Image (spheres, grey):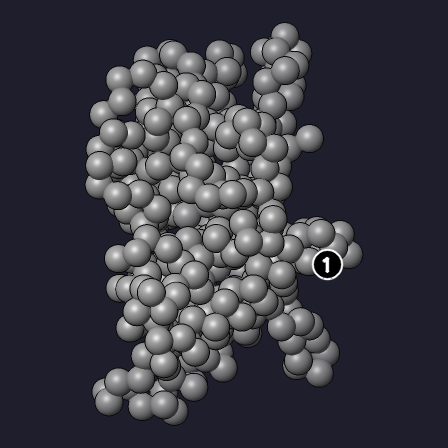
Amino acid sequence: MTTPVLTFFNNKGGLGKTTIVYHLAWMFARLEKRAVIFDLDPQSNLTAAFLDEDEIETAWNEQHGGSSVYKCVSSLADAGDIAEPVLKNITANLYFLPGDIRLSSYESILSGAWSNSMLDNNLCPYMRILSSFWQIMQMASDQIQADIILVDTGPNLGAINRSVLLSTDYVVIPMGTDLISLQGITSLGPTLRKWKYLWQIRLDKWAESGEASSDKDFLLPKGKMQPIGYLCRQPSLRLERPIKILDKWTKRIPEIYHEFVLHENLSNNGQLHKNHCLATIKYYPSLLPMAQEHRKPIFNLTSADGAIGAHAEAVQDAKKDFLQLATKITSQLADPAYWENFADF
C-alpha cells in the first residue's frame, strides 16, 4: 500500500505556490493528518520557510545519509543506491525533507535516463533514476506512516518536474488572473497527458522485460498525475490593471482549465460540467513577514507575535480559508466517485 502524493504545480512562477504548500501542510497537521513534505524545487524556498539557515547548512553539509533530497538521490549517478531520507520533525504530524540547490545538477541525469529507458535491455538503472523521487517519498512515508505526501515544485517543464509528476497521484494547479497564467496552462495540460502516455509506454516495456520478472520487489509509480482542481490567487489591485480586466481573466479560467487541463468539452448547453476551483487564495501582505519572522503559518500567529486588531481578524480569516481548502482536498481524495469522469485523462 503506497501513500498518495499530492503535488502543487504550474510552469509559471510567482503564484504563491510555496506559501500555499507551507500553510496547507500545517493545516493537515492540525487536522491530525500525518503529512510528509518534499521540497523538489532546486530554489529551495520551502526549505527556507521551514528551517533556519543553520539547519539548512547542516542538512546540506552532512557527510552521510539522506539529509536532503539531493543527498538521497545523488549516488544514483554513480550506480549507487538511494539513501534513506532523514526527515525533520517540524511539529506533531508534520515531517519535512529539505530541498537542496544542488538538485539542479540532477536534471541532466534524469534527461539521460528518460532517453535510455527506451532501450531494449539493462533498463533497471534508468527506471531507478526516473522513479527515484517516488522511491524516497514512499520510504519517508513508511518511516512515519504518513497519510499524505505534499510536494512543492519549481516553475518549469523540465526533467526534474517530469519525474516529480510521474511520482504524483494528484495535482493542484495554482492560477493567476492574467493572460500569462492562462496561456501557461494551455501547454501545461497537454504536457501532463504526454508525460503520462510516455511513462505508460515505459511501464509496459519494463513489465515485458526479464528484469521486471527477476526483481518483483521493485515497484514503480503509476504516473496518475490526476488534476484535482486549481487555486485562483486573489489579484493585487493596481491602477494599471483595472478591476474589469482582472475580472475578464478570472472568468476565463474555468473554461481554459476544462479544455486544456482536463481535455473536457463543455456540456451541450455550453455550461461547464463542474467547478474545479478549490479556493481563492487571499493576499496577506502584512502578515506574511510576521509569520516568516516567527517561522510559523499565518493562522498560528498570536498577539504575542504582534497579530492584534485587524491583524488578529486576518489570522482567523486565514485559518478558516486553509481549513476549508484542506477539508475540501481531503474529501475529494477520499471519494472514488469524484474521479469517475476523469478516467481518460
Q: Is residue 58 left or right of residue 34?
A: left
> Which residue is outermost to the front?
304
Residue 308 visible here: yes
Foreground of the two, 19 or 108: 19
> Which residue is outermost to the right?
337
In the image, what residue occupies the spot 43% across and 31% down?
A: 87
Foreground of the two, 201 or 133: 133
Quadrant in the rendering for residue 339: bottom right
Quadrant in the rendering for residue 283: bottom left
Q: Secondary structure at mark 1?
A: helix
Quadrant in the rendering for residue 235: bottom left
In the picture, which quadrant includes the N terminus?
A: top right
Q: Position of residue 216 (x, y in %)?
A: 65, 14
In the image, what residue occupies the spot 46% across and 70% down?
A: 318
Foreground of the two, 177 or 56: 56
Residue at mark 1: 338
Q: Amino acid at mark 1?
A: Tyr
Q: Position of residue 113 (x, y in %)?
A: 40, 25
Q: Position of residue 129 (x, y in %)?
A: 43, 24
In the image, what residue occupies the spot 44% across and 37% down?
A: 89
- At label 1, counting other C-alpha atoms closer than 10 Å, the crowd grade (few under 14, some 14-19, many 20 or more) is few
Up-down relation of residue 309 to residue 152 (above or below):
below
Foreground of the two, 332 or 13: 332
Q: Is residue 205 left or right of residue 154?
A: right
Q: Is residue 148 left or right of residue 95?
A: right
In the image, what residue occupies the spot 32% across and 79% down?
A: 236
Up-down relation of residue 268 to residue 45 (above or below):
below
Q: Is residue 221 left or right of residue 316?
A: right
Up-down relation of residue 230 to residue 25 (above or below):
below
